[in-house]
Image (cartoon, rainbow, N blue to C red):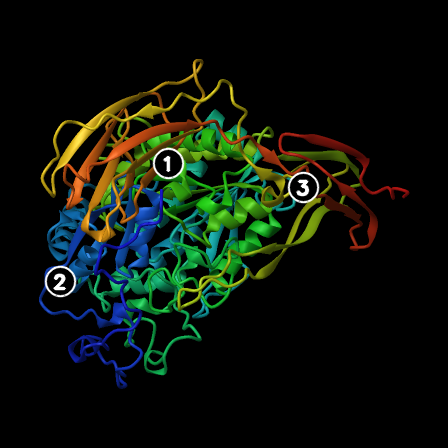
Amino acid sequence: MSPRIPRAGATRLATVTALVAAGLAATAAGATGNAGRDDAPRELARAADGDTTQIVMVKAPTVADRNEVIDLGLDVTEHADKRGIEVVLHDAQDAQTLRDAGFTWRVTVKDLEALMKKNRKADRAYAASVAASGLPSGRTSYRTYADYLSDLDQLARDYPSLTRPLTLANKTVLGEDIRGIEVTADADNVKDGKPVFLLMGAHHAREWPSAEHTIEFAFDLLQSYSAGDARARDLLSRSRVILVPVVNVDGFKVSRAAAPLGDFSVMDYEMKRKNCSISANTPDQYTTGSCDNNLAGRLRGTDLNRNYPGFWGGGGASPNWSNDTYRGDAPGSEPESDAVRKLISERAVTVMISNHTYSNLVLRPPAIAATGLAIDEPELKALGDAMASKNDYVSQASYQLYDTSGSTEDWSYWITGGFGYTFEIGDEGFHPAYEEAVVGEYLGLAPADGAGLGGNREAYWLATEAAADRDLHSVIRGTAPAKHTVSVSKTVTSETSPVIQTNGTVGEPLLYTDNLRTDYTSTGGRFTFDVNPSTRPLVMGRYGREAQAPPQAPITLTNPAGVPPVGSSEYVTFDVQGLPTVDNGFLVVSVDWPATADPEAQDWDFFLTGPDGEPVGSGATLANPEVIRIPDPQPGTYTLEANNYLGGSAEYDWSGEVTFEGPTPPSPTGTKEAWLLSCADKRGNVLATREVVVDRGETVDIGNACKRVKD
């Protein structure tokens, strides 16, 4: 559809408004320094003025609409679906910003602080009522960071041959280690050639269930293997699982230790999302104090899941230092995201899941619509759908929610070729009641939506199976003497997105470099080395499909008799056909009305509902005609709502047409990249090198890897 145009008289939110109110600054216990009045952004101007903090679902049925809401600079929760996106309204000014931009909403949480208090009470009651939950660990309440360290250490002690403690390459901004654990048979043999499933939590500090689910799967794997479970023994003999419960250690420690306020205000540190870095763009008055006690409050830091270099700097991430989705000062600038990047670059991570909350979603690349569907879309979708069948989440490409540049899986997939996903766990809140958000969602128990289906534990088992599935990655076979190291490596340079500047202009993309290398140490004789494809998905091309039939003939929409009053609607239906009769790659609804000297005096809005009753698109701008474009429409009866937004009359009534286009054909580039394969003896002397091209699902036998190949 056309980009949304704000209604007449509406203006975008000013990027700089009033300063931090004196009362707000004073709420930071012990905070010192003077709050300057010139450079305070909108986020810091929200004062605790007695307004009840609410969460509202803004009606935004298209990706363009949801991107528009994000661009308004409000406190967006990131909980979204095909109907809209949730926003925290702190005060009347926030509500007015939405009205001015032409959006409507319904209240989903009337009093956020009251809800948070209710959840804390439920947590206390649950922990007091049961000695142990049904979780693999038996846990009954949210862990502190010390609890995570204790559990990681205990698992390593209890299962020494199946685990290897892991510390990522970088320390955090505040000097903390980022800890994890590796789980597989003979775990200490890191260079064993096995494919890796990487499961991570808490890129965002306040998303506590994401870390809980991650560590529970470590317990699950180890207990299942030790109990003789055939699935666990098979998978852990053929693959390695790496679990990093808390990526954002600094932010998580702040969030978990904070005195609960429950209102998402600037000083509500429990709702901290970002890490603890201080941007070079931060005004001086907000650079003092500690991460958990400063004038910028919880807004200090970088959103780690907008900082990865893949398509960094584009939509869905803010260039403003105080925004909750601040992308960082440069692509991959943060030590925490860089540590994950190094881990993935040094291991054959064939499947990766980054856990988040909340929206009941399984998201796959691409995260930006302009990127185009991945060449591996059928396989990515099939695995996403299979995992979603276990937790009853919606499986979709990430961009179908809204654009999100700089995300973990968008870098890892496009650069390394390993399948990457984001899980948005649960449907209410960043860390709601433990019994539902952790016990229910992990095990698939009521009241979780996936009750009876297996829950996230079964989704993670499917991901482990996919990581080990050689149809979904690549294999190199050959021979090598014992204690010789066979390596595959390559250095690649890629572009970020065109970089959105703080003034709204768009600059050129930046270049970044990745050094990918995975090692296998031979035990002597024949070896099998699991790797990702040698060619990056970034350069392979884009997915499409050949038409199996012609597209459907156009449909002229029948405008119902009469004209609804201003503010009211009328409805018309039309039928969409499917294979084998027609093959519709796109459905396009175009509606217009007679032009006037004052185009803002007449305006119609249009909303399209699919055969399942779900919204699929809208045309609700000031454009004339309004255009709604839907890819791969499902067969069935569609309903078009025509809303007389402003001044519609018999003289200025609407007319419309539905047209259809065939599918976009595939666009493979034919480009092939090679792994540089090398063999080194136990002293590190390189004996031989060669280039190896290996595609997804392909096995290449290279013979003697340590024999020099003549040119």
| Mark 2 vs mark 3: in front | 2
Dot 1 or dot 3: first in sequence order is 3
**Any mark on residue 289, and which?**
none
639 to 401, vertically: above or below: above
Task: Give the CA distance from mark 1 to mark 3.
Answer: 36 Å
Q: Is residue 395 left or right of residue 550?
A: left
Residue where numbered disc 3 is placed: 534
| Along the viewing direction, whichever of 47 and 569 lies nearer the viewer | 569
Residue 629's mark?
1
Q: Tag 1: residue type?
A: Arg
Q: Amino acid at mark 3?
A: Ser
Q: Nearer the viewer, mark 2 or mark 1?
A: 1
Tag 1: Cα neighbours inside 10 Å, few (<14), some, or many (≥20)?
Answer: many
**Residue with the mark numbered 2:** 92
Left or right for 501, reference 692:
left
Q: Quick one: 87 or 681, which is closer to the camera?
A: 87
Measured as percent of width and height from the top left, residue 267 is found at 23, 69
